[in-house]
Image: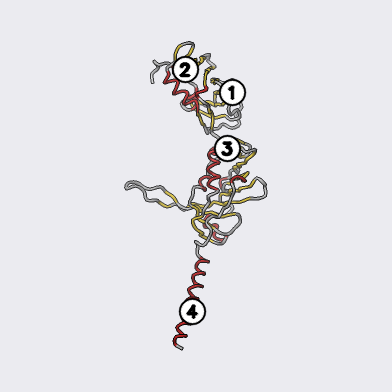
Amino acid sequence: MKKNTILMAVLVLLVVLYLSTNYFKKNSSTSFDPQIVKLDSSKIGKITIYPPAKEKEEPIVLSRSSGHWEVAQGQIVSKADPSKLRTALGQLLDVEAQRLVAKTKDKWPNYELGDSLARKVLIEEEDGRTTTALYFGKTSYGQVAGPAYGRGAATGPTYLRLNDEPETFALENGLPNTFNRPFNSWRNSEFLKLDKEKLKELEFNAADGEAFVLRKVDSLWSIAGTKSDAPKVSQYLNSLARQNSSQFVDGFSPKDKPLYTLTIRGQDMDEVVVRAYAKAEENKFVLNSSQHPEVFVESDSVGLFKRLFVDREYFQSNKDE
């Protein structure tokens, strides 16, 4: 009899332990699938970023057409920066929540996840039927231990909810910052892209009448038959080959002829023309490249303008550094 009582007590204890374990697992904040977003980047056709209502800005729309991405805000439409798109799409495929922090909608205000405070990212597949909405709320910043001297970087989780589901999650990857960038940073900043090995002739013209041609014959560059300084030419061509600018001037329409023109010719390439127009502000210019004819960018006299529009003396070996 005593043995049966002990066995019964053990059995009851085991049942209690089993039920308790399952109860806590069920109610634990860690008992969720961290892969809360499941997307196929090859099917994504449109991403719309709605800023918090308090910012009073128009949404940023990223859309794919014929394999190319564009970005628009209001009436401004531009080519999208391919590297930014790759980063964003890659991060969308790897959204893993750190933990579940709340289970009900009434907790959303605590994490700035209401419609008026959250940043909404609406992801649409190309079929137009499947959509996923991510809502990013506040970030809880904390101080990370840094070197022996000085402070570490501030970091912390950003709170996230999905579609209209009530749960709130903590997220600790770079995705919130990816979608918290201004419109211009999504735009393709490429101004010039050239293969310097193909270049044969650079023609410089200025409205004041100064003009010259830097020409390559065999392997030597010269101006009007006078050999140019090879290191200076190499330095200039290296700079010319890749130039970017995100100082966009939208709505600009040239009313006068350009003050400066650079015409670039080479082997097996289309002629490229760069123009610099006067801007109302002193020592400011608006530049345009025929590689991106719809794009105008601003430069002062020591920025992009100075890197492209040099004078004849620049290529002479006796010019002071």
- Pick whichever of labels 1 and 3 is earlier in the sequence: 3
Crowding at label 2, few (<14), some or many (≥20) Cα neighbours within 10 Å?
few
- Pick whichever of labels 3 and 2 is earlier in the sequence: 3
Q: Which residue lies furthest to the left in this view?
A: 148
Q: Name the residue under label 4.
A: 11
- In this view, 27 is above or below 202: below
Horizontal side, residue 321 vs residue 237: left or right: left
- In this view, 94 is above or below 268: below
Q: Residue at x 60, y 51 (%)?
A: 133
Query: Which label sits in the foreground, 4 or 3?
Result: 4
- Pick whichever of labels 4 and 3 is earlier in the sequence: 4
Crowding at label 3, few (<14), some or many (≥20) Cα neighbours within 10 Å?
many
Crowding at label 4, few (<14), some or many (≥20) Cα neighbours within 10 Å?
few
Asked if the residue under mark 4 is in contact with the one under mark 2, i.e. CB atoms within 8 Å, the reply is no
Quote the CA–CA distance across marks 2 and 4: 93 Å
What numbered label is drawn on residue 219? 2
Q: Name the residue under label 1.
A: 270
Asked if the residue under mark 1 is in contact with the one under mark 2, i.e. CB atoms within 8 Å, the reply is no
Q: Which residue is drawn at 49% across and 58% down?
A: 99
Q: Where is residue 56 in the image (x, y as percent from the top left)?
A: 58, 45
- In this view, 195 is above or below 145: above
At label 2, the amino acid type is Ser
At label 1, the amino acid type is Asp
Q: Can residue 282 be seen in this view?
A: no
Q: Position of residue 43 (x, y in %)?
A: 62, 46
Q: Which of 138 and 282 is in front in this view?
A: 138
Helix, strand or loop at disc 1? loop
- In this view, 309 is above or below 160: above
